[in-house]
């Protein structure tokens, strides 16, 4: 069984900051990449940022320069520092992990339960 547990969401004023964290646990042999997605009401889930096990990062254009993703493979954790938050950043944020449970099994997508980020004055 693999679990991804997010923490750190909440309410913040426009221009404020939040830090999201996600910890993966369970039977995990290898991590290919971890990342954050978000889904606002009435919209499709979209990639916010991702980081490979080698440290290569990828950001949505809308968050470049404001959000920073970091990962710790040994601890099986990924974090997202969100600065200069805007109302349009408001969404449920989901942690994603591309994980292999055993040698030779290939990578599969695993998801956290989601954490709400509300940006409002």
Image (cartoon, rainbow, N blue to C red):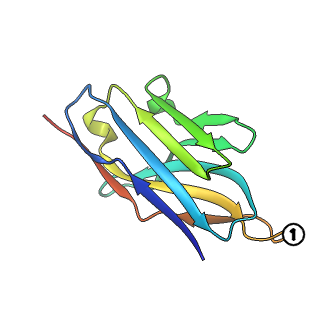
Residue that mark 1 sits on: 104
**x, y (%) of residue 31?**
71, 55
Q: Residue at x 35, y 55 (%)?
A: 115
Where 82 falls versus 36 (above or below)?
above
Which residue occupies the extreme left position in the image?
121
The image quarter containing residue 88 is top left
The answer to whether any part of residue 92 appears in the image is yes
Q: Residue at x 33, y 39 (%)?
A: 89
Which residue occupies the extreme right position in the image?
104
Answer left or right for 115 relative to 62.
left
Q: State the SS at label 1.
A: loop
Task: Quarter of the image for the N terminus: give it.
Answer: bottom right
Where 65 falls versus 90 (above or below)?
above
**x, y (%) of residue 18?**
34, 36
The image quarter containing residue 62 is top left
**x, y (%) of residue 40?**
33, 52
Task: Quarter of the image for the C terminus: give it.
Answer: top left
Answer left or right for 114 relative to 106.
left
What is the crowding at mark 1: few (fewer than 14 residues within 10 Å), some, or many (at least 20)? few
Where 1 falls versus 106 (above or below)?
below
Q: Residue at x 41, y 44 (%)?
A: 20
Answer left or right for 13 relative to 1.
left
Q: Residue at x 69, y 62 (%)?
A: 99
């Amino acid at each position: 069984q693999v679990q991804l547990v997010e923490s750190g969401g909440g309410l913040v004023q426009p221009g404020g900051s939040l830090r999201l964290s996600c910890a993966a646990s369970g039977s995990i042999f290898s991590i290919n990449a971890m990342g954050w997605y978000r889904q606002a009401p009435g919209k499709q889930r979209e990639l916010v940022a991702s980081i490979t096990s080698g440290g290569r990062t990828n950001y949505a254009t809308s968050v470049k320069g404001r959000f920073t993703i970091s990962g710790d493979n040994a601890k099986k954790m990924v974090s997202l520092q969100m600065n200069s938050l805007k109302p349009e950043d408001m969404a449920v944020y989901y942690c994603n992990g591309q994980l292999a449970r055993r040698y030779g099994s290939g990578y599969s997508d695993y998801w956290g339960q989601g954490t709400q980020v509300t940006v409002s004055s």
